[in-house]
């Protein structure tokens, strides 16, 4: 085997574990249907944050989401976690326990996480 082929083979062998490690360490989205379904009435804010991550940095639209119901549009007020097109809204009572939760997808969402939002999410800030 020539030295060049040996070097190429060594490079390929080294890239396989690096690719696997990168895949394992790459952050996975916390805002999913599965994680939204884990939120139950009576959970504390810290239990919710353990599943979804910390509450995102407030934005001017936070806490109010309009959604359609059989009776027409209604406003749902609560804290929301939004990542990509997935949204989990959680309403807390006076004791900071979950009163109600909703999970839904917004396929035509114009909101996009900025690079800084993604870094904050990855670092759990």
Image: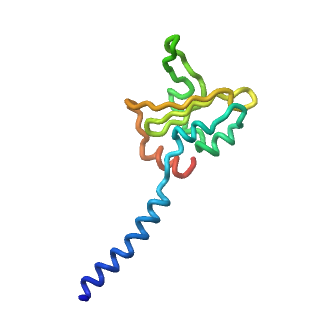
Q: Is residue 37 above or below residue 29?
A: above
At x 26%, y 88%, the residue is: 3
Residue depicted at x 61% and y 44%: 51
Quarter of the image where one finds residue 90: top right
Quadrant housing the N terminus: bottom left
Please state the horizontal and vertical placement of residue 16, each as a whole percent of the image.
39, 70
Residue 93, how many percent across, how many down?
71, 26
Q: Quadrant of residue 54?
A: top right
Q: Is residue 122 above or below residue 72?
A: below
**As displayed, is residue 109 above or below residue 70?**
below
Q: Is residue 84 left or right of residue 71?
A: left
Q: Residue furthest top?
A: 71
The one nearer the camera, 57 or 43, is 43
Residue 100: x %, y % from top left? 64, 27
Q: What residue lies at 54% left-to-right and 36% top-to-bottom? A: 81
Considering only vertical position in the picture, is 56 above or below 61?
below
Residue 114 image-quadrant placement: top left
Horizontally, residue 93 falls left or right of residue 88, namely: right
Residue at position x 48%, y 36% in the image: 86
């Amino acid at each position: 085997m020539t030295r060049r082929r040996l070097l190429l083979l060594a490079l390929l062998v080294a890239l396989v574990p690096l690719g696997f490690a990168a895949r394992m360490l790459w952050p996975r989205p916390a805002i999913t249907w599965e994680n939204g379904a884990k939120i139950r009435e009576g959970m504390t804010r810290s239990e919710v944050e353990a599943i979804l991550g910390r509450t995102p940095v407030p934005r001017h639209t936070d806490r109010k989401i309009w959604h359609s119901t059989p009776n027409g549009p209604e406003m749902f007020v609560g804290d929301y976690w939004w990542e990509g097109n997935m949204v989990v809204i959680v309403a807390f009572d006076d004791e900071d326990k979950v009163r109600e939760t909703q999970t839904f997808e917004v396929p035509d969402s114009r909101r996009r996480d900025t690079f800084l939002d993604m870094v904050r999410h990855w670092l759990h800030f």
